Image (spheres, rainbow, N blue to C red):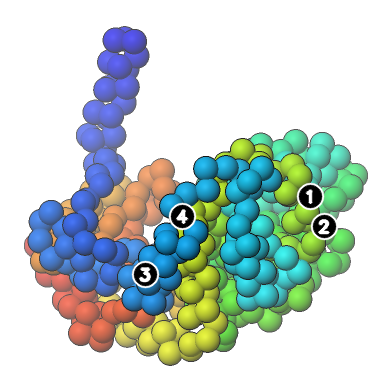
């Protein structure tokens, strides 16, 4: 083991030398737009707390009540004795919200994506995946035995070529899978065009909407609502760990037959504890708030528009878009180190952001991914931009 440890230490030292070490900063308060860290108070611009619900008092109260009413944990997988009536209530509510017949809960969306492909697709089938899909989709595809095809990010000409290749290979079933909103870029997938092509070739469409459910689209139902294809997307996966309260748990929302088959064969579902009762109750309340209130979505859109406008005026390079994920780019060979230094300088000024570099994003495409929240005030947004400018001047 000592030799292996030496090898691992050399690998870690190289990551450090390349300026790519990812360090976890410690938070001393609940998740919110304003947080405490071991270095002091900070404005938080790097959480997935899009609707500001992570510390919402009604959600916290619902979770508290569930501890008394339902207990702390399930101590069981779903098919043995791990399904409470509230689990089914949440699954029904999710399906109604995203517009499918049914849904099924998983411990996380990573598990949902990790479990679905090998259930639906065998060696005689094909899966066609966007090259920038989330790691959970990539890993899930690797677990299945289907023929694998990949198309360039949001490139419909290349998707057509891959659909033709799958057809020519004699695939029985073909599944096109894409992120609804790409988490490192903030781009929405062109779902209308994807659905057009899928229908032309008789393929199914699956969308991971983790960075869209609750706040993208007029009613917050997701990227398929924003693109006008709610009735054309076959499968939606998503998370309870971002806009919908920020707890834990994921889901697959789909036709009844898909959900029922996942209950029989999806390994992360069959061999993992059920989502904790307090998380289920809090998520139910978060879903209700997201469904019934448009104001947080309006505030979120205003904050994103203001941030993009101010940062553009200040001369920063941003990836275009309307999503509350706003990548501030630091391209080039030294970009990773510069982005990390800027993020550190901003934290020293009380603004918490995180730099992303290889292997999370391609080499030479380092960035600070800013994530706006409905919990941010206009002054919070302006303070963030001021910190970016000051940190850039300091780092040079």
| Separation of marks 3 and 2 at Cα, in angstroms | 35 Å
* Residue contact at pointers 2 and 1, CB within 8 angstroms: yes
The residue identified by callout 2 is 257
Looking at the image, is mark 3 or mark 2 nearer the viewer? 3
Spot occupied by residue 286 in the image (x, y as percentages of width and height):
47, 73
Nearest to N terminus: mark 4 or mark 3: 3
- Quadrant for residue 309, please give it: bottom left
Total number of numbered discs in the rendering: 4
Instruction: Work out whether residue 58 or residue 15 is closer to the camera in this orientation and state it.
Output: 58
The dot on residue 261 is 1
The residue identified by callout 3 is 60
Instruction: Work out whether residue 259 or residue 383 is closer to the camera in this orientation and state it.
Output: 259
Nearest to N terminus: mark 1 or mark 3: 3
Q: In terms of secondary structure, where does tag 2 sit? A: helix
Q: Is residue 90 visible?
A: yes
The dot on residue 71 is 4
How busy is the neighbourhood of tag 2: few (under 14 within 10 Å), some, or many (20 plus)?
Answer: few
Nearest to N terminus: mark 3 or mark 2: 3
Q: Is residue 207 above or below residue 385?
A: above
Nearest to N terminus: mark 4 or mark 1: 4
| Separation of marks 4 and 1 at Cα, in angstroms | 29 Å
Looking at the image, is mark 4 or mark 1 nearer the viewer? 4
- The residue drawn where x is 63% and y is 76% is 97
Query: In this rendering, would 273 be left or right of 267?
Result: left
């Amino acid at each position: 083991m000592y030799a292996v440890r030496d090898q691992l230490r050399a690998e870690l030292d190289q990551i450090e030398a390349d300026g790519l070490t990812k360090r976890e900063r410690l938070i001393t308060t609940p998740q919110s737009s304003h947080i405490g860290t071991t270095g002091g108070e900070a404005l938080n611009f790097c959480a997935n707390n899009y609707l500001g619900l992570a510390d919402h008092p009604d959600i916290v109260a619902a979770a508290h009540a569930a501890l008394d009413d339902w207990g702390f944990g399930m101590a069981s997988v779903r098919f043995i004795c791990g399904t409470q009536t509230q689990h089914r209530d949440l699954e029904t509510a999710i399906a109604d919200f995203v517009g499918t017949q049914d849904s099924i809960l998983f411990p996380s969306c990573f598990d949902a994506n990790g479990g679905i492909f090998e259930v639906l697709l065998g060696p005689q089938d094909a899966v066609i995946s966007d090259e920038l899909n989330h790691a959970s989709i990539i890993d899930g595809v690797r677990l299945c035995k289907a023929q694998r095809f990949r198309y360039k990010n949001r490139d419909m000409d290349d998707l057509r070529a891959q659909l033709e290749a799958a057809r020519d290979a004699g695939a029985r079933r073909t599944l096109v899978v894409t992120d609804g909103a790409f988490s490192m870029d903030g781009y929405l997938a062109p779902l209308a065009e994807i659905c057009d092509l899928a229908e032309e070739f008789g393929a199914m469409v699956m969308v991971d909407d983790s960075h869209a459910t609750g706040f993208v689209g007029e009613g917050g139902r997701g990227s398929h609502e924003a693109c006008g294809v709610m009735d054309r997307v076959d499968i939606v996966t998503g998370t309870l760990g971002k806009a919908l309260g920020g707890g834990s748990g994921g889901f697959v929302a789909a036709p009844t037959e898909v959900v029922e088959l996942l209950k029989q064969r999806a390994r992360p579902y069959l061999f993992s504890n059920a989502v904790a009762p307090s998380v289920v109750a809090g998520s139910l309340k978060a879903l209700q708030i997201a469904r019934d209130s448009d104001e947080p979505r309006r505030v979120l859109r205003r904050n994103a528009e203001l941030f993009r406008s101010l940062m553009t005026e200040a001369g920063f390079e941003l990836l275009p878009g309307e999503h509350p994920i706003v990548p501030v780019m630091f391209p080039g060979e030294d970009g990773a180190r510069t982005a990390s230094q800027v993020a550190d300088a901003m934290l020293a000024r009380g603004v918490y952001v995180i730099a992303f570099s290889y292997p999370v994003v391609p080499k030479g495409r380092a960035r600070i991914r800013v994530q706006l929240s409905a919990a941010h005030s206009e002054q919070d947004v302006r303070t963030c931009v001021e910190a970016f400018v000051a940190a850039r001047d300091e780092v040079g």
